[in-house]
Image: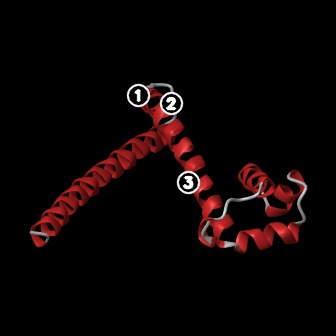
Amino acid sequence: MADSQRKLTHKQEQAIIALLSNRSVEEAARACSTAVRTLFRWLKDRDFDLAYRAAKRAAYGQAIARLHHLSSAAVTTLGRVMLDADTPPAVKVRAADSVLSHAAKAIEIEDIEARLTELEKAADLNKSSRNR
């Protein structure tokens, strides 16, 4: 097996889980019964770093999925707060600002995604025309 595709040890896999589950490297080291120096050395290792970053991306993806799931309820809550006659004006303004801010960001993201899709199509067309 190539050195860059080396499989992590069980202890290193446990360390990645501990790093994702604890607030600091020191706490993670205690949680997986590994020396702090060893954990810091592993963090400098290319294969460990790649696996750790992949695990962080996966965990972050799960968090984003949870946010998407909760976003409808969040918008409903903001709407209720914003429209409730008993809500203090400052809270209404903050809720309205939040709704507008997130709506604007969503539009920007949609625009960027559309532009990226067009660029990818153009690159694919350019690539296929060069291959002929």
Asked whether the residues under the numbered discs 1 and 2 touch, taking CB atoms below 8 Å apart as contact, a structural biologist would say yes
Residue under the point 81% across and 66% down: 39
Q: Amino acid at mark 1?
A: Leu
Which quarter of the image is occupied by the C terminus? bottom left
- Quote the CA–CA distance across marks 1 and 3: 37 Å
Q: Amino acid at mark 2?
A: Thr
Q: Which residue is mark 2?
A: 87
Disc tally is: 3
Secondary structure state at the residue bearing disc 2: loop
- The residue mark sitting in front, 2 or 3, is 3
Residue under the point 17% across and 59% down: 121
Q: Amino acid at mark 3?
A: Arg
Q: Which residue is mark 1?
A: 83
Point out the tag, 1 or 3, that comes first from the N-terminus. Answer: 3
- Image coordinates of residue 3 in percent, x first then y, are 63, 72
Residue 116 relative to residue 126: left or right: right
Residue 5 relative to residue 106: left or right: right
Tell me the number on the disc at residue 57.
3
Tell me the number on the disc at residue 119.
none
- Image coordinates of residue 7 in percent, x first then y, are 67, 59
Q: Residue furthest front?
A: 1
In the image, residue 55 above or below residue 25: above
Residue under the point 82% across and 56% down: 28
In the image, residue 78 above or below residue 124: above
Residue under the point 41% across and 28% down: 83
Secondary structure state at the residue bearing disc 1: helix
- Quote the CA–CA distance across marks 1 and 2: 8 Å
- Image coordinates of residue 85 in percent, x first then y, are 45, 25
In the image, residue 130 above or below residue 121: below
